[in-house]
Image: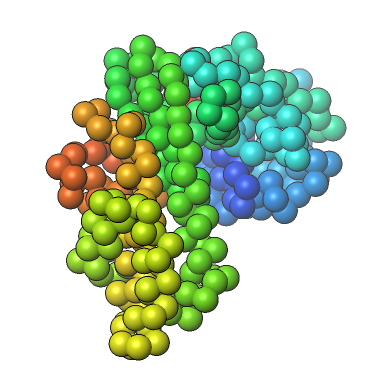
Amino acid sequence: MSEFSEISLIAADWGTSNLRVWGMDHQGNVINRITKGKGMSSLMPSEFEPYLMGLIGNWLPKEGNAKCPIIICGMAGAKTGWKEAAYLKAPCPPVNKEKIIKIETEDQRISVSIVPGIMQKSPPDVMRGEETQIAGYLSKKPDFDGIICLPGTHTKWVHISAGEIVSFKTFMTGEIFLSLSERSILKSSVQSNDFDPTSFLEAFEDTYSNPALLSSKLFGLRAADLLENTSAKFLKSKLSGYLIGSELAGAKSYWLGQNIVMIGNDDLCVLYEKALKKLGLNATIENTQNVTLNGLKQACLGR
């Protein structure tokens, strides 16, 4: 008998550009995983179920009365996803089991549920997927009071108190970095796989202390390439520093005097950690996969 026959819960983090899936046993131990699947932007609503079943069909018994629960967070619950899971309104707990939506499926071997995202009315803001990561962290640290920063394409600064998401602020720093480095006049100046921490921190301090000069500083990268033949390694590092400096200046009301926890890509979290340390702040970095899985198990199993 296949080890997959031991799978009793399937958890998925279905983002805009990627899908991660974990198959777990009764104790919540991961038996198998998929780390690179198609994201929401590559699928029509009618394609979600057949695509998922093409990936995990062999994890399931061919027949039987018991349905395998599948719990999903992220963009699968967006308007253009599998099925819309309406936002919960902050302040609120990151995950409310009573608000998790059920989906009718063609395949009778599965029972699919999607975790809703969180919205904020004033100022307008939304999240999908991050709420599950926050729930996973709070499942282990229920008394945490402070700020959770989730660096990524759309970095979020989230105020947590009494087990609830009180408020949050999103910065498009990651998306702006990608757009500038791949589709702007800077693209030929910042193509490098190397990184220089000193250049990063110098640029960070420049725009943190004077964020109004961000646009001018960015054009200065192109000029430094043309006139001084500055290495792409240094220019790419400065691009990161300028953007993160501007973000931390804008997020100051969130992080000032707070306990800070970061959840996200390790390399990106390290950059934010360096920047925060320059401001005299310490931050704890949490493993993204662990907190996501904890949050999904919390949503489905209550543990």
Residue 286's quadrant in the figure?
A: top left
Where is residue 126 drawn, in percent x and y? Answer: 57, 32
Q: In which quarter of the image is the N terminus?
A: top right
Q: Which of 131 and 122 is in front in this view?
A: 122
Instruction: Say above or below: 82 vs 192.
Output: above
Residue at the spot 49% in from the left edge and 21% down from the top edge: 94
Residue at the spot 41% in from the left edge and 30% down from the top edge: 158
Instruction: Say above or below: 240 vs 23.
Output: below
Residue at the spot 29% in from the left edge and 33% down from the top edge: 255
- Among all residues in the image, which is located at the extreme left? 280
Colour treatment of the image: rainbow
Residue at the spot 49% in from the left edge and 16% down from the top edge: 91
Where is residue 76 drawn, in percent x and y? Answer: 68, 37
Where is residue 110 drawn, in percent x and y? Answer: 72, 29
Q: Quadrant of the C terminus?
A: top left
Residue 257's quadrant in the figure?
A: top left
Where is residue 254 drawn, in percent x and y? Answer: 33, 31
Q: Can residue 193 be seen in this view?
A: no
Q: Report the label total.
A: 0
Instruction: Say above or below: 150 vs 35.
Output: above
Q: Can residue 172 be seen in this view?
A: yes
User: Taking 118 as reference, is 141 left or right?
Assistant: left
User: Taking 232 as reference, is 282 left or right?
Assistant: left
